[in-house]
Amino acid sequence: MRQRIYCAQLLCVCLSLALSSAQVIGAEESRSRAGEVRKSSQERVLRGVLAIYVWKMTDAVGLTEEQAARVFPTVRKSFETRWQLAAKRRNFLELFRRSIDAAPQQESELKRLLNQWEENEAKLQVAQEEMRQTLTKILSPEQQAKSLLFEQQFEGDLVRLIAEIRREQAQRPLQNKPAMER
């Protein structure tokens, strides 16, 4: 039962992301205005996912109020940093694809992108290490193990839900068109 509630909550957050993204894409506003809307939409999604993450982590790890008060400022900072760095990572992967698919491959451009990728990965590792060190200082060994398991499950669930929403979005335009246009 808890798993269904958890999945439903993650689905709601992801659906709000999908709907917000669809509104941005469909809007006929200027490019800068669309960027502002997209950014505020992403921030709302981040806050929603973070709230679910904190709530589920508290339950999964069995945090006391005192532990939660000490852990969550670092968790929040790390989560936000990792969220932003993961978005950059996805952008880099897309840039790699485009650069490789370009007719004359630009070696200098690829080198520049690879250097930026490495910087991003290093920042991601620092954020993860800061969170791990904080958890090590505050949590018992059992809670640390539960935290690691929770983190893996949460990330996997989130990735699966986002993929499911993207598949549904991709199918929606076909469902809304009359049969003769398909």
Image: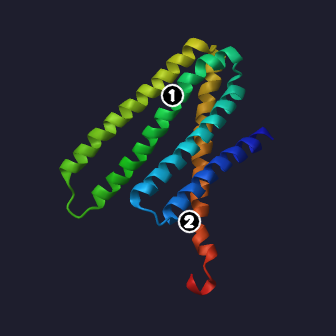
Q: Which sits earlier in the primary sequence, circle 2 or circle 1? A: 1
Q: Secondary structure at mark 2?
A: helix
- The image shows residue 45, relative to residue 124, as above or below, that is below
Classed neighbour count for the residue bearing mark 1: other residues with Cα under 10 Å, few (<14), some (14–19), many (≥20): some
Q: Residue furthest right?
A: 1
Residue 9 in which image quadrant: top right
Query: Disc 2 and disc 1: Cα gap in Å?
Result: 33 Å
Nearer the observer, 30 or 13: 30
Residue 30 in which image quadrant: bottom left
From the top left corner, tell me how far across and down residue 153 is, in percent. Answer: 62, 37
> What's the image's color scheme?
rainbow
At 63% from the left edge and 18% from the top edge, which residue is drawn? 69
From the top left corner, tell me how far across and down residue 58 is, in percent. Answer: 69, 26
At 51% from the left edge and 59% from the top edge, which residue is drawn? 24
What residue type is disc 1 on?
Lys
From the top left corner, tell me how far across and down residue 124 is, in percent. Answer: 42, 32
Image quarter in which the N terminus is found: top right
For label 1, the residue is 77
Classed neighbour count for the residue bearing mark 2: other residues with Cα under 10 Å, few (<14), some (14–19), many (≥20): few
Give the numbered dot on residue 166. Answer: none
What residue type is disc 2 on?
Ala
From the top left corner, tell me how far across and down residue 122 is, in percent. Answer: 36, 30
For label 2, the residue is 170
At 55% from the left edge and 26% from the top edge, which residue is drawn? 75
